Amino acid sequence: MAPSPIFNLSAQDADKILSEIRSSGYIREVASDVPPEESGLWDVVHFVPDSFSPSAKLENQEAIIDHAVETLEKQEWDSTAIVVADERTAKDGSLLIYNVDSTQPKGKRLVGKLRAVPRSVIEVVCNLQVSNMDLKEYANCIKEGDVFDAGS
Amino acid sequence: MVSLRLLSLSAFVLAAASAASAATVTFDCSKVPNICSNDCYALKCAGKPSTLHRNSAAATDNRNHNACKSPNRCSGNPDDSNSCDEYPYASTSEGGAGAVTRCVPAHENSVQGGTLSSFYTRSNVQQGDAYNVAFTGTSGLQYCGGSCSNSGNEVQRRGMLFNKRQQVTLHAERRFKLENGAEILMFEPIAKRGAFNSLVGQTVHLNDVDVKVVEAL
């Protein structure tokens, strides 16, 4: 599977965020017989190089989605799911996930969005990539607040 | 007539070879019992194919054409049935309209998606590639053994009778032993009886590891 992009709009510590994402117990649950880094889930998401650069003009939702669909897809990224580390990430650690339909015309590609704790990002993204579950199903699992957390 | 028979034979041999040489994903039903029940119902009782072809490009469209379309009928259900599972999977050419669906626990469905995603990556299943579906730990599961009597939890969208995806394949249950001692259940098309025999000696994907098939039971 091609990786889904993470846009680091606030130039936060990418290694730290990626480490939190990969600390997911979900990987161990799905791939219980191999080390997590050898599972097919370890590289489900990757940071887009230099995506925090102001020159990239990725300051709004539509620009991010268009960039992923029109530029990254040609470079073998998967734009079905897009992850964004934004200003709120700096405050509460949660990441924003967009579900995108790249077959739709510009401006109509966003299917839905959801905030998730880093350790639940791989779970959500890999399910979006194979269209096994949608964001509404994950949102329905949130008991309190607006951030999806499947637990450790 | 002879030519037709030869063509039929060639088609059978090719189909059998395709199924046998394809990678096999094995779902551990101790982790996802409701998913396995739905898949078994689809295969055994609704005649859905046991060899699928990856088609990620059609995945979103496929899910939008069956009872799992968002927001779906499982939304708002209790935790034991709040997510919509489908077989054949949305990320295959066989998915979409006519897929068999069931409301399952969201966490189970989520684990299944991860298993499929991991399998595509680890087994290098590319767009258009064929793969087989197998199950382990099916003992006592509804539809994986015994009756096909629908207790009401299985739903298949009607009105698409002439769609090629609605073709029914009759299956025979086949069981194989793995080198780790586990037993897997597969559904072999009756029209291609013996097609899975050559799986012996090959590996199947189970819990992210390739495990060798050692014996047909």
Image (cartoon, rainbow, N blue to C red):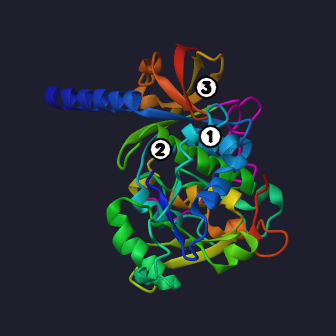
Q: Nearer the viewer, residue A127 or B11?
A: A127
Q: Name the residue beneath numbered marker 2.
A: B120
Q: Amino acid at mark 3?
A: Ile
Name the residue at 15% across, 25% down.
B2
Q: Which of these two is toward me, B78 or A140? A: A140
- Residue A30 or residue B25, whichever sits in front: A30
Horizontal and vertical percent position of residue A116:
69, 67
The answer to whether B148 appears left or right of B217 in the picture is: right
| Residue bearing the label numbered 3 | B184
* A64 on left or right of B126: right
| Left-right relation of A73 to A129 | left
Pair 2/1: label in front: 1
Secondary structure beneath label 3: strand
Label 1 crowd (10 A; few <14 / some 14-19 / many >=20):
many
Task: Please name the residue that numbered disc 1 is placed on.
Answer: A36
Secondary structure of the residue carrying tag 1 is helix
Image spot of residue A79 (x, y percent) = 45, 67
Which tag is nearer the camera, tag 1 or tag 3?
1
Chain under disc 3: B
Label 2 CA crowd tier, 10 Å (few <14, some 14–19, many 20+): many
- Residue B143 belongs to magenta span: yes
Q: Residue at x 45, y 24 (%)?
A: B196
What type is the residue that disc 1 sits on?
Answer: Pro
What's under tag 2, amino acid-wise?
Tyr
Q: Which residues are magenta?
A: B136-162
Where residue B1 sits, quadrant-wise, is top left
Name above or below for residue A5 compared with residue B46: below
